[in-house]
Image (spheres, grey):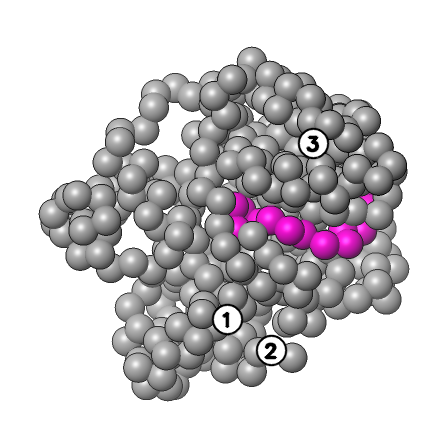
Amino acid sequence: MAFSELDLALIDALQAAPRAPWTRIGRALGVNPTTAARRFERLRAEGLAWVTAYDAAKTATVAYVEVRCRPRAFDRVSAAVTALPWVFSVDETAGDFDLFLSVAAPDLPSLGRAVHTGIGGLRGVRSTRTRLGMTLYGEGRDWRMRAMNPAERAGLGEPGAVARPRTYSTHLHARPAPEDQALVTALGADGRLGYGELGALTGMSEHTARRRLQRLIRDGDITLRCDLAHPLAGLSTMVIYRTSVPYALLERTGNALARLEQVRMCASVSGPYNLLVLVWLHGLGAVDPFEAQLAERFPALEVRDRTVALHSPKRMSWLLDEHGRATGRVALGLPEL
């Protein structure tokens, strides 16, 4: 274990309130604010936990791409797609495809060009299959470590995790203002930057940075979340499920699935299997009990395919080592093809 119980509670608190002052975080956990700040700085320096930011789901066209590689080309293709700024997450898998990519684009035509040319045109790619993201029922910002006790959570003064459906865009209605995009970019590297630091990095006054960021948060145009090296926290197994559910039950099932503690991401997608579910589990031995839970709670849900992730070299633009620790970052950007 790379994390102490206090570390995990600290991460849980930052998942609930990524930019909360250290005084509030420390008070909730019963520690000195300086201790809380120092502990998180150690976690961040070691790549064990980090707070990041990115544009909200409603602002982008998102798709999930399954890539099959030619023999002996896997490492080259994985490295190439990981370096692309608009491929925001990369998972190397054991299944009927080799790579599972999460990609973003400003609209459907540019998404098609990016996938077919930017990915399909890479040397060593055998084939691609694209599932367009439609409704996001839950994502990494909604997932919780669940390490705080009820009293600590109440002391934080933040509501519990409630995943709300968000519809992906099929086109970018309007380019974000340069000042807003500069804030998102700066917070992508460090989501806890102070307003003075944000102002200095973006060329704004502290007051302007505060006002603009608070508006972005209020309007739901920015997503903030705290991530961690999940394999070192005991969550060693990630499984990607492609499932089907009758349309009449789709929204209800998606919302309920997003509230399960094992579910990291749940989205409706195009194609014959209309619900995509990603879970983090405590080892392969937890797969059967989880699927038994699915069968009991969601009798209409049919699991069509399960794919185990072998390694995730990139998650939401952050580069990860074999233990899930952050080692660097490729700033998120939309394709220009």
The residue sitting at 64% across, 19% down in the picture is 117
Image coords of residue 64 (percent x, y): 66, 33
Q: Amino acid at mark 1?
A: Glu
Q: Are marks 1 and 2 in contact (CB under 8 Å)?
A: yes
As drawn, 139 above or below 77: below
Range of the magenta residues?
Answer: 300-318
Residue 96: x, y in percent?
A: 87, 38
- Report which quarter residue 80 is drawn in: top right
Per the image, the residue denoted by label 3 is: 65
Q: Residue furthest top?
A: 109
| Of callouts 3 and 1, the N-terminal one | 1
Instruction: Using residue 15 as the reference point, say whether residue 139 is left or right of it.
Output: right
Taking the image as shown, residue 55 lies to the left or right of residue 180, namely right
Q: Quadrant of residue 220?
A: top left
- The numbered mark, 1 or 2, whose residue comes first in the sequence reads 2
* Residue 79 visible, this orientation: yes
Q: Is residue 122 above or below residue 12?
A: above
Image quadrant assignment for residue 324:
bottom right
Q: Residue 146: x percent and y percent?
A: 57, 69
What's the magenta bit mostly, secondary-structure-wise? strand
Q: Dot 3: within a 10 Å radius of its alpha carbon, few (fewer than 14), some, or many (20 or more) residues?
A: many
42 relative to 113, above or below: below
Do the numbered discs 3 and 1 sit on residues whose CB atoms are within 8 Å?
Answer: no
Q: Residue at x 42, y 79 (%)?
A: 39
Q: Which residue is mark 1?
A: 46
Amino acid type at image mark 2 = Ala
Mark 3 element type: strand
Three-letter code for the amino acid on which mark 3 is drawn: Val
As helix, strand or loop, the secondary structure at mark 2 comes to loop
Residue drawn at x 28%, y 68% as measured from the top left: 21
